[in-house]
Amino acid sequence: MRFSEAFIYTSKEAPSDATLPSHIYLVRGGFIQGIGAGLYNFLPLGKKVLDKIRAIVKDELDKASAQEVDLAFVTPSELWKESGRFEKYGKELLRFKDRKDAEFVLGPTHEEMMVNMVRQYVKSYKQLPINLYQIKYKFRDEIRPRFGLMRGREFLMKDGYSFHKDEADMIENGFNKMEKTYSNIFTRLGLDFRVVEADSGAIGGNGSKEFMALADSGEDTIVVCKGCDYGANIEAAKRVPKTEPIYPEGEEVEMNYGKFHTPNVKTIDELSSFFHIDKYYTVKAVAKKALYDNNIEKVVLFFIRGCDELEETKATNAVNANELIDVSEDELIDLGLIPGFIGLEGLPKDILAVVDSELKGADKLIIGSNEKDYHTIGFQLPDYGDFYRDLIKVQEGDKCPNCQNELYYTKGIEIGHIFQLGTRYSEPLKAEFLDENGKSRPFVMGTYGIGVSRLLAAIIEQHHDDKGCIWTKATAPFDLEIIVSNIKKEDELKIADELYNNLKSKGIDTLLDDRKERFGFKMKDFELIGIPYAVIVGKKITDGMVEIVDRKTLEKEEVTLDSAVDRVLELIK
Ligand code: ATP
Ligand code: MG
């Protein structure tokens, strides 16, 4: 491609709301154009990168025997009603009607559509397993679209779905196979990533893993171990249960059960200083309002140790809610609760209480008495009951559940997600097959997503400097750029042209910067766009020499014109 003929327009101006390098450089470099909150046009450079990523995704999936399909983007809402998600999905789901008043949604994900397709054709275990995918735009009316391609409203996703006769087959021929395939894809793209345990929603279990591109700008906090390869999203992270603080001999904590007058002592800080005791021994009640389908709301009390924090996703799953929101003190008082003194004994009826699993059987606790200005000390929780759930946010310094070493936080960008779905969709949608014994069974499914357009952002977050993008070889919009230093010098242009044609004939995708601009200006564009290498045809051509610049290091290497092609081939292969 000749730059002088290309639809490539770089700019010095970054979008006013842009904070991340990927957002700034993708816009300034002429890869994408913002046209509204979370909506982007892909310009030729961006489209080339997107297609390269897409091709790698497709190649690896096809190798794993997955088959590509392309489903309608506009989805009849009946399917979403069958699965029960029409209500549940909330405002992210764009719903609309056509001229005949029929209801539709713009697919934010395609489980229903895919199950609907497969149930019409697959009737026997002999047709299983099947793995189908598409690479297609999705629409989610995100509450806070931001960071450019990172969190768009319309974005390109690879979404895959596998169908199996039983769970064992889904794990082996679906989930595990896709884990391997995804690792291959992200390795080929040149990303530094980690596979972590993820939240499985209300389904629970260990059936969900996320692929995280490691980057300080990542929106996800991931918990990783100093000693082993344990990694988990904070929403799903586990730890070795906290143990009693170590006190010098003879100073161990002892408590007899009883009520204690604690006037105005409301917060955990106040409580721990009032009793001169570690927060480990205190219990706090975190009140939230849980939201359910059909506008049902319910106040829930989550009881955790005073030294811990509530993890909202875990808490949401614990009560099967769609969402948790804050609740005011006045609302609590109306329900008969006494903020600052809430405990487990003597709670008003109808109040739902969930207790953190680590408190199961715990004793020597200080907790509110549900009475103004009173706390109960020496409180003990029973070792039974079904109101215990994992509720706490793992903290840095907690111990790894695998190897007991120290855990710490790092940041990641979710680029992929694989999920053991089971029969969550096949059951309500009555997608069934006949097993070996002629018995009808719902398909056991897996679902697998990759944020294809988000990958452009993730790659730049990991590969940039203060001048612009540094694309990996597998994802660069061009393999090489040739810069004509002084366009007015006919010999420079002529040699650059010959070199360009020569490289093109060897299959090297080259951008020839033949614009009538100053050398410095062209060099700045090369740095901003981030093509891995440039050959500069300049003054030294009179001595038969050209320069090769490595975008990553910006180091220059002089080579003879005759050897330039071979050297380029060597570098970019
Ligand atoms: P997130 O937690 O980032 O909102 P998600 O868990 O809702 O993502 P999935 O439903 O698992 O996303 O979608 C599969 C993949 O699609 C994600 O792993 C992510 O890479 C990508 N993705 C999701 N939402 C967006 C978005 N708004 N913009 C760009 N890519 C997205
Ligand atoms: Mg996800």
Image (cartoon, grey):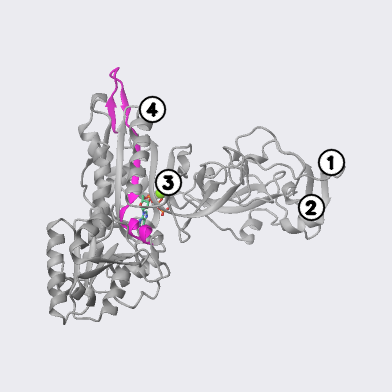
Q: How far apart in space, not on screen, are marks 1 and 4 (Cα)?
A: 51 Å
Q: Which residue is mark 3?
A: 210
- Residue 511 visible, this angle: yes
- Expressed as whole percent of the image width and height from the top left, the position of residue 573 reads 25, 52
Q: How far apart in space, not on screen, are marks 3 and 1 (Cα)?
A: 46 Å
If the image is split into quadrants, where does the N terminus sit? Answer: bottom left
Q: Amino acid at mark 3?
A: Glu
Asked if marks 2 and 3 touch (Cβ < 8 Å), the reply is: no
Describe the element under mark 3 as helix, strand or loop.
strand
Is residue 348 rendered to the left or right of residue 139? right
Q: Residue 168 — which label?
A: 4
Q: Kindly identify the residue that appears in the image at 38 percent across and 32 percent down.
A: 171
Q: Amino acid at mark 4?
A: Ala
Name the mark nearer the viewer: 3 or 1: 3
220 vs 537: above or below: above
Closest to the observer, 198 or 397? 397
Closest to the observer, 306 or 387? 306
Q: Looking at the image, is mark 2 or mark 3 earlier in the sequence?
A: 3
Name the mark nearer the viewer: 1 or 4: 4
Q: Which residue is mark 2?
A: 374
Q: Looking at the image, is mark 4 or mark 3 earlier in the sequence?
A: 4
Q: Kindly identify the residue that appears in the image at 48 percent across and 36 percent down.
A: 205
Asked if marks 2 and 1 touch (Cβ < 8 Å), the reply is: no
What is the span of residues highlighted in magenta in the rendered image?
A: 431-460
- Expressed as whole percent of the image width and height from the top left, the position of residue 429 reads 31, 37
Q: Cβ(mark 3) to ligand 2 < 8 Å? A: yes
Asked if residue 454 lies in the magenta stretch, the reply is: yes
- Expressed as whole percent of the image width and height from the top left, the position of residue 277 reads 79, 51
Name the mark nearer the viewer: 2 or 1: 1
Is residue 267 rendered to the left or right of residue 315? right
